[in-house]
Image (cartoon, grey):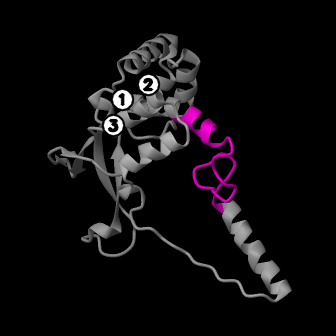
């Protein structure tokens, strides 16, 4: 189903105004205050992308900046966090895609114990559940064994091919999965530091 004007307007409203722009240097405020003409043109672009089954390369080109974590030696890469800056128009399109995806997986596909990146669920829910378990086990005087697993660079090492298989397993429409796949396929990135920009390189994981 083609992206609609109301969906574009909704997606634009979801973008935070303080987000840094990508390589095109167009800030979120331009879209938020661009008026009905801009929203209509943006919707036309998204609809044409949907018909052709392709996403512009500009939407896939990331600029990576690094931020110091404020701890440890500044000379060590592990003490810096990389952030990928993408063009806002691409983020708006991604918002349009993620809304029906979230709605689909919420239809009984995810267990109640899954709280990550879900509406009305978060870290506090898991903390509350853990504390309740501790208290109940103390009252009942039974042993409680807990394990905390911190996956290093978890999102950076996601196997994309497996991700598409999971979407198909969850019953996502084939064309919808194809459009979602277009966003990371062929993605490139450049690292910028003190005004110096590296050569572009392919991003194949995460």
Q: Is residue 27 visible?
A: no
Give the residue displayed 45% in from the left and 34% down from the top.
177
How far, Cα to Cα, is label 3 from label 1? 7 Å
Question: Is 34 placed left or right of 198 in the picture?
Answer: right
Mark 3: secondary structure: loop
Please provide percent x and percent y for residue 75.
24, 71
Q: Are marks 1 and 2 in contact (CB under 8 Å)?
A: yes
How far, Cα to Cα, is label 1 from label 2? 7 Å
Please provide percent x and percent y for residue 104.
61, 37
Question: Which image quadrant for residue 148?
Answer: bottom right
Question: Which image quadrant for residue 4?
Answer: top right
The dot on residue 30 is 2
Q: Are marks 3 and 1 in contact (CB under 8 Å)?
A: yes
Question: Is 26 placed left or right of 121 in the picture?
Answer: left
Q: Which residues are magenta?
A: 98-123
Front residue of 98/112: it is 112
Q: For mark 1, what is the residue?
A: 26
Mark 2: secondary structure: helix
């Amino acid at each position: 189903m083609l992206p609609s004007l109301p969906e574009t307007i909704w997606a634009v409203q979801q973008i935070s105004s303080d987000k840094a722009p990508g390589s095109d240097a167009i800030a979120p405020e331009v879209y938020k205050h661009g008026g009905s003409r801009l929203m209509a043109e943006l919707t036309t672009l998204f609809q044409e992308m949907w018909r052709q089954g392709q996403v512009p390369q500009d939407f896939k080109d990331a600029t990576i900046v690094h931020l110091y974590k404020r701890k440890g030696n500044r000379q060590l890469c592990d003490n810096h966090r990389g952030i990928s800056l993408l063009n806002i128009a691409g983020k708006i399109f991604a918002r349009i895609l993620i809304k029906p995806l979230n709605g689909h997986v919420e239809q009984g596909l995810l267990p109640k114990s899954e709280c990550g990146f879900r509406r009305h669920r978060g870290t506090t829910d898991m903390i509350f559940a853990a504390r309740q378990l501790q208290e109940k086990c103390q009252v009942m005087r039974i042993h409680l064994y807990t394990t905390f697993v911190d996956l290093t660079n978890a999102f950076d090492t996601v196997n994309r091919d497996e991700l598409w298989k999971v979407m198909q397993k969850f019953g996502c429409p084939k064309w919808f999965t194809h459009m979602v796949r277009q966003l990371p396929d062929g993605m490139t990135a450049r690292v910028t530091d003190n005004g110096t920009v590296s050569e572009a390189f392919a991003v194949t994981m995460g």
